[in-house]
Image (cartoon, grey):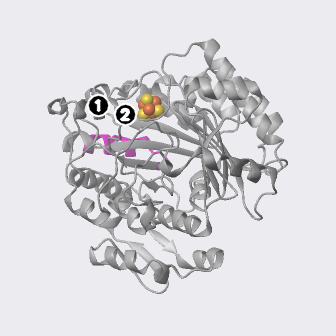
Amino acid sequence: MSDETVPNISTQKSQPSSDPATTRADRTETEVGSVFVSNYPAYSFWSEEDVPQVHRALADHPHPDTKLGLYLHIPFCRKRCKFCYFRVYTDKNSQQIQTYLDALAREVEHYAQQPAVKDRPLHFIYFGGGTPSYISSRHLRALVTRLKDAMPWDHADEIAFECEPGTLTQAKLEAIRAIGVTRLSLGIENLDDEILRHNGRAHVSKEIYQVMPWIHALDFDQINVDLIAGMVGETWPSWRQTVQKTIEFDPDSVTVYQMELPYNTVYSKDLLTGDSERLSLADWKTKRAWHAYAFEQLAAAGYVRSSAYTMKKTPDARFVYRDAVWTGQDLIGTGVASFSHLSGVHYQNAPNWDEYLAAIDRGDLPIHRAFATNREQQLTREVILQLKLGALDLAYFRTKFGVNIVAHFATALSGLRDEGMLQFDADSVTLTDEGLMRVDQLLPDFYQTQYRNARYT
Ligand code: SF4
């Protein structure tokens, strides 16, 4: 899973939510449904009808001053976590993985010929999943050789790579470092073996302790660690221990998510079929308290806030991928079910294995559904995503969109101020600590009416 901008790849089916403010006030239990917001308008509004707009955008010049990034989806995992809604496969053999990686390379080669992409420098590359570190060093090297031939990335500002601890060896980490990875993100999630096992994680804590020294020794520019507050079975003592041990690992940044239960996860199905008594699930208030505790402890250890989810050790350290997505830069998402954004058009690849491979075999781009945004939707998208930073830079929006945010979103801002979620004046919008811990629940207040109360995917 990708940090901060998740979900990039989802298979979830969500139900309409009720009015945002009511939901916020009443929502204490963790119920089945999506809370995390990664895009706007919601994926359920994307359709096949808008796919020709993608082809028009690809055939045209790129928007001036827009940077380009490449996302590569590696959809393989050792096991499916019980809370996972990403498009992943746990049953593919080496030959099938080779077939998929060949298709991925062909897709990138196809993009490299498109007028909107051709000869543009890559600002960042992101290997997400799934579990990119699941594939062998041999597969990884062969893939990267082809990718770099098609779209050189020697001058990229960031090459990010997600890892699952139990898939790493010293040799594989060396291979990951050798391809130029600058930001390694390790999905620890928790350090309690019983919690890891219960939630269906493939790794155990021993593997985390084993790989951390190897990772540090390779001197990546940034090491990020992902944690989840509120995994099934979590308690205050287990969470305190996870946070304290994470700080001892001394990563450059720590990203904390609050556990949620979108549709189509093992846990959600258990809940919906009445097996929920077996789940020991924290309510939202407790998860926010755990999230806040992690941030307080990290602050005491010298970390500063990077976003509602992430604390970082070096104040000027950047997360290029996140910042590019949240400022509307172009992102080519490759691989099964991947999401892209090009010249204002959102789109998603074919969502399953066979369709994806068949499209590549035909020599087509495997584009499944799209949504061509207008200026208002682009503005709203950037406002809600950048609110996740904890504050909005109003001058940025004046310059880019010619809009005074405080006047434009007066109703949403006043309502949220009255609820104690944020403060604003003519120059700034800043979330309160309470608002920061529940930012995703606040964002629908900024949506245009027709995009509220909708299915998420
Ligand atoms: S490691 Fe778990 S949560 Fe992450 S993509 Fe794989 S199955 Fe999903």
Q: Amino acid at mark 1?
A: Lys
**Residue 222 visible in the snapshot:** yes
Q: Secondary structure at mark 2?
A: loop
When asked about the image quadrant of residue 196, the answer is: top left
- Which residue bears the numbered disc 2? 264
Residue 349, compared with residue 303, is above or below; it is above
The circle drawn on residue 220 is none
Q: Position of residue 204 (x, y in %)?
A: 37, 25
**Residue 340 visible in the snapshot:** no
Residue 279, compared with residue 298, is above or below; it is above
Residue 317 horizontal side relative to residue 147, left or right: left
The residue nearer to you, when weighing 266 against 376, is 376
Q: Which residue appears at 73% of the width and 49% of the height?
A: 156
The residue nearer to you, when weighing 153 against 368, is 368
Residue 223 horizontal side relative to residue 240, left or right: right
Q: Amino acid at mark 2?
A: Asn
Q: Position of residue 136 (x, y in %)?
A: 62, 20
Q: Which residue appears farthest toward the left when viewing the image?
A: 277
Q: Which residue appears at 50% of the width and 28% of the height?
A: 88
- Which residue bears the numbered disc 1? 269
The residue nearer to you, when weighing 295 against 228, is 228
Quadrant of the image where one finds ligand 1: top left
Asked whether disc 1 touches disc 2, contact meaning CB atoms under 8 Å apart, the reply is: yes
Residue 404, compared with residue 201, is above or below; it is below
Residue 330 horizontal side relative to residue 444, left or right: right
Q: Secondary structure at mark 1?
A: helix
Q: Earlier in the sequence, mark 1 or mark 2?
A: 2
Residue 114, compared with residue 76, is above or below; it is below
Q: Which residue appears farthest toward the bottom when viewing the image?
A: 426
Span colored in magenta: 240-253
Q: Position of residue 315 (x, y in %)?
A: 52, 62
Residue 45 horizontal side relative to residue 193, left or right: right
